[in-house]
Amino acid sequence: MDGYFTTERHEDGGYILLMKHGDELSQVAISGDGKCLIEQKEGGTAWDFIEAKYASSSMILTYSNI
């Protein structure tokens, strides 16, 4: 999965990660087995972002089960 990403606030907290696919935006979700990211039209994963100064790598993505 490569491309451009943006976010949109989720009504229950966190953010929905959106990926540009042609002229549309698709939601990014975690696969059923939890091993990769997948693209889907609805029901994307709600993500929380933390400042990198608190992490050992430049970016960490976490998800909550909303």
Image (spheres, rainbow, N blue to C red):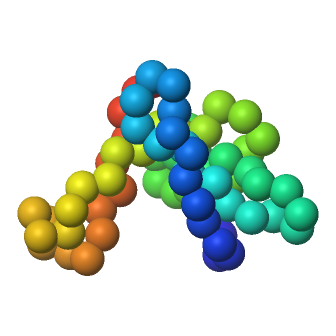
Residue 38 visible here: no
Name the image quarter holding the C terminus.
top left
User: How far across and down, in percent of the image, does residue 23 sit?
Assistant: 89, 63
Relative height, residue 7 to residue 45 (above, below): below
Residue depicted at x 68% and y 60%: 19
User: How far across and down, in percent of the image, does residue 38 sit?
Assistant: 64, 53
Residue depicted at x 65% and y 31%: 43
Q: Nearer the viewer, residue 47 or 39?
A: 47
Q: Nearer the viewer, residue 4 or 39?
A: 4
User: How far across and down, in percent of the image, does residue 21 sit?
Assistant: 81, 64
Q: Is residue 51 left or right of residue 6?
A: left
Residue depicted at x 78% and y 41%: 41
Relative height, residue 51 to residue 43 (above, below): below
User: How far across and down, in percent of the image, does residue 15 sit?
Assistant: 47, 42
- Count of all numbered marks drawn on residues in the image: 0
Relative height, residue 2 to residue 51 (above, below): below
Residue 22 visible here: yes
Name the image quarter holding the N terminus.
bottom right
